[in-house]
Amino acid sequence: MERLSDVEEMTLSEFHYKTHAQEYKEIDDMYRLHLAAFLNRNASATENKGTDKNPKEEYIFKKFEDFFDYEKAIKQVEGQYQEPEKATDRRQLSPAELAMKRNK
């Protein structure tokens, strides 16, 4: 809905769907902003390692990898999209056997 002519040409139903979609997009944007603020707070978290006389605070996360494991996240996503295993024997598996194998 960038131009007024686009809005004038759409039906009322289309307008309502686009309005709802925009509201959901704004909620997603707010979610991302709040998540960034929360992660910023967690990334800068410290703990007291010293004594009362000599207080010393250290960051809880020493390295970025301690805070976010990029490789682990990539492996999780790749694991969702792996091709299904093929049957090792020559016969076809029944639907029940396929379901049982999938649910392991």
Image (tube, grey):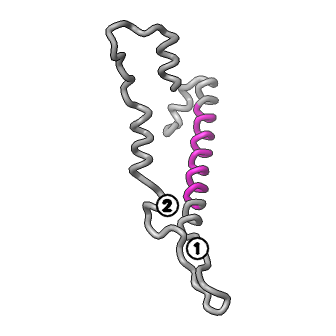
- Report x, y in % for residue 103: 53, 24
Q: Is residue 79 left or right of residue 34?
A: left
Q: Which residue is mark 2?
A: 67
Name the quadrant containing residue 17: top right
Q: Please, what secondary structure does the residue beneath circle 1 have?
A: strand
Residues at badges 1 and 2 in contact (C-beta under 8 Å)?
Answer: no
Label 1 to label 2: alpha-carbon separation: 13 Å
Residue shown at 47% from the left, 57% from the top: 68
Q: Which residue is mark 1?
A: 46
Residue shown at 61% from the left, 87% from the top: 55
Given residues 66 and 94, the one toward you in this image is 94
- Report x, y in % for residue 65: 43, 60
Residue shown at 36% from the left, 26% from the top: 83
Mark 1: which amino acid?
Answer: Thr
Mark 1 residue crowding within 10 angstroms, few (<14) / some (14–19) / many (20+): some
- Report x, y in % for residue 30: 60, 51
What residue range appears in magenta?
Answer: 18-37
Q: Is residue 88 left or right of residue 40?
A: left
**Residue at the far front in the pictured view:** 89
Name the quadrant containing residue 45: bottom right
Given residues 94 and 57, the one toward you in this image is 94
